[in-house]
Amino acid sequence: MDASTSVAILIATYNWPKALQQTLMSVANQTIQPNEVLIADDGSDERTSKLIQAFKLHHPNLNIIHVWHEDNGFRLAAIRNKSIRMAQSDYIIQIDGDIILDQHFIADHLSLKEKGFFVTGSRLLLGKKITDELLESEKINFARLRWKGKNFFNTLRIPMFTGLLQNSYKTKGKYLYYVKGCNMAFWKSDLYLVNGYDESFNGWGREDTDICIRLIHTGVKKKFIKFGGVQYHLHHPLASRDQLEANDALIEQLRLNQISFCKQGLVKSEQKN
C-alpha cells in the first residue's frame, strides 16, 4: 500500500445493528486497517448508535465516525453524500452494513487503486439459515461460508488473476455499467468531479448505476475486482421496488443525454446542511 494514500471504508446501514456488528468485526480483522470507518446511517433508531458506541470502546484503534440523518424514507444517496463530505481520506471503499469481509478485502482493493479508475466487485449471497447462525456468532469460519450460499466462485481469492482480469472482466459491452454498490471503490476527488450521488434517486435501486455512468461519461474508467475483494452478503427480505420504474427512467435519461454532473448531489447537499 502507498502510505501516502489514506483510505476510508464507507458502510451504509439502516436499523440492523446485529448485521452491522458482523460487518464491523470483519473490518477490525482486516490485514490493512482503514484510516477511518464512516457509517452512513439512513435514519436508524438508538439501537444502532448504542452498538456503534460499544464497538468503539472495544476497538479504540478504529477511527469510527457515525454519520446519521433523520429517517425520511429510503435516502441512501443522501446519506452516502453526507458521509463522503465528512471523509478525510483520499480513497473511499464502499460497502453495506450487511456484508462480512474477507480479511484481505481492503488490501485487495488497494492493490487495484489507480488514478482515473473506480473499482467494483461482487459478493456471495448467503442463505437465511447460515445468516441466522452468523448473527449470533463471534467467530466466522470463512472456509465453511464458501459452501453456504450462491455464487461459489465469488469466494475464491487468487491475487494473480485479480491483476490479470481487472481491465477485461465485466468492463465492456453489456457489462460496462454493471456495478454492485456493496463493493465499490473511488477516489474522493472523482466523486466530487461528478458531484457525488444523485439525490433525485429515492427508494431502492439504480443510484449506484447512476454514479457509474456519470463517472464513465466524465472519463473515469471502470475496473472489476475478480478473485479478490471477497465479501459475504447476509440474507434479508428484499427492499421495496416501488421506485424502481422511476429510477430506471432517470437512468435512461442519463444515458441519452451523456450527463456527468448531477444537480442534487454533494454540492447541493452541502448548501442544505
Image (cartoon, rainbow, N blue to C red):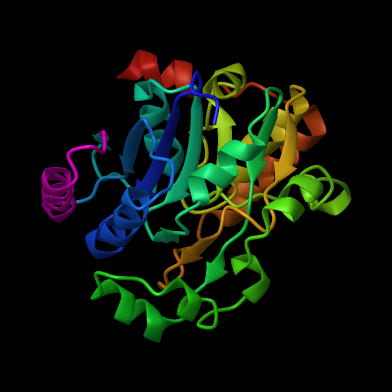
How far across and down, in percent of the image, does residue 9 sit? 42, 39
Quadrant of image for the N terminus: top right
125 w.r.t. 95: above or below: below
Q: Nearer the viewer, residue 178 or 2?
A: 2
How far across and down, in percent of the image, does residue 133 sit? 31, 81
Number of callouts = 0
Q: Nearer the viewer, residue 208 or 5?
A: 5
Residue at position x 39%, y 60% in the image: 98
Q: Nearer the viewer, residue 9 or 34?
A: 34
- Could one spot residue 16 in this view of the protein? yes
How far across and down, in percent of the image, does residue 262 sit? 59, 24
Left/right placement of residue 215 relative to residue 47 reads right
Residue numbers of the magenta segment? 45-63
Left/right placement of residue 122 relative to residue 139 reads right
Residue 210: image quadrant is top right
Dominant SS in magenta = helix
Residue at position x 48%, y 42% in the image: 94
Residue at position x 46%, y 50% in the image: 203
Residue at position x 61%, y 17% in the image: 193
